[in-house]
Amino acid sequence: MNFASDNWAGAAPAVMSALARHNTGFAPAYGTDPLTDNIGEKFNEIFEREVAVFFVATGTAANSLALAAYGKPGGAIFSHRDSHIQVDECNCPEFMTGGGKLVSVSGGDGKFTPDALKDAMAAFPDGVVHHGQVASVSISQATESGTVYTLDEIAAIKDVAAGRSVPLHMDGARFANALVTLDCSPAEMTWKAGVDILSFGATKNGCWCAEAAVFFDLEAAKGFEYFRKRGGHLFSKSRFVAAQFDGYFEEGSWLSTASHANAMATRLADGIRDLGGRTAWNVEANELFPILKRHQFEKLETAGARLYEWPAKDLTESVAPAQDEVCLRMVTSFATSDEDVDAFLKVLAETV
């Protein structure tokens, strides 16, 4: 009953198999090996165009270095107030961008609207040296509330960013989970909707240590190798990151693992609702935020369930936790089984 995080799961069998398969002989270092080149071509195929791909070790590095590539003196980076770059990256984006300012944009369901973004950007008028410069916009897909931006929503946010001539960055830590929810192509969810640079996350979906910064604008990618090296994320044995992506993409494994994780989250949410609980936000990927009685939470923890208490923000009175209730975060993964879900729901049923 481990629903603490998809980061707690191990590596998917296809990934581990690929690591073993490519662990033979010798290969050139620092990303000059044939396998790394092949995976670059695979990214081109997936995104239906030529892209520039740079492997990094963590999502924090992918986000921070991507934003640094579009940095400006006095630059302002706009993202949701609960976004990972705002809350969970220890000021790394500010550090990597040389002092870029993260500006919070409010919005329910983990998303912000184009109008909210436009209002926030208005505080940084062009040509006024005292206020700094609008530098970039970042969205999380899926969001920290487990919701997913639609293609139209992404395009509308891009329109606002384009109106100020700044790029749109997507934090895709759970990219595959959002992709299967929307049932669209990677191209449709990124550059065709206006995304300029993507933090492509794979670790949460079954890789061991494989993230990438993906540029859709090849001109903007020039020189990024220096950002990566200076940031300490140039792998000497790059083929082992490439090997993970090889297994990840093999026979659509990455979409299968994401589909399974999403299905487990939906099954959990349905079961919780059947037992009288509710969720703070719609369950659209592999995260859910149930609201339960505190005694139920304590009983589940005692029985061995691993999950987190979570702050409930911007909820209507009918959904917000009552005094004797608590909002929780649960995350499913490729490793979540039907038995895990059934065991959780069985304990919860005993508390009703």
Image (spheres, rainbow, N blue to C red):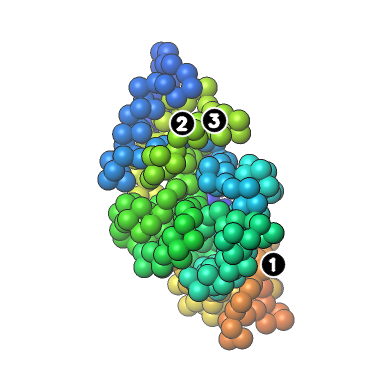
Per the model, the C-alpha gap separating discs 2 and 1 is 40 Å
Looking at the rendered structure, the secondary structure element under dot 1 is helix
- Name of the residue lying farthest toward the top: 25
Percent of width and height locating residue 14: 38, 37
Q: Residue at x 62, y 67 (%)?
A: 123
Q: Which residue is mark 3?
A: 226
Mark 2 vs mark 1, foreground winner is: 2
The amino acid at mark 2 is Val
Label located before the other in sequence (2 or 1): 2
Label located before the other in sequence (2 or 3): 3
Mark 3 vs mark 1, foreground winner is: 3
Q: Is residue 93 visible?
A: no
Per the model, the C-alpha gap separating discs 3 and 1 is 49 Å
132, above or below 17, in the image: below
Evaluate if marks 3 and 1 touch, with contact meaning CB atoms under 8 Å apart: no
Looking at the rendered structure, the secondary structure element under dot 2 is helix
Residue sitting nearer the eye, 266 or 350: 266
Quadrant location, the N terminus: bottom right
Label located before the other in sequence (3 or 1): 3
The amino acid at mark 3 is Tyr
The mark total stands at 3
Per the model, the C-alpha gap separating discs 2 and 3 is 19 Å
Instruction: Decide: few, some or many residues near mark 3? Use Cα within 10 Å; few <14, some 14-19, many ≥20.
Output: few
Q: Which residue is mark 1?
A: 298
- Name of the residue lying farthest toward the bottom: 318
Q: Which residue is mark 2?
A: 241
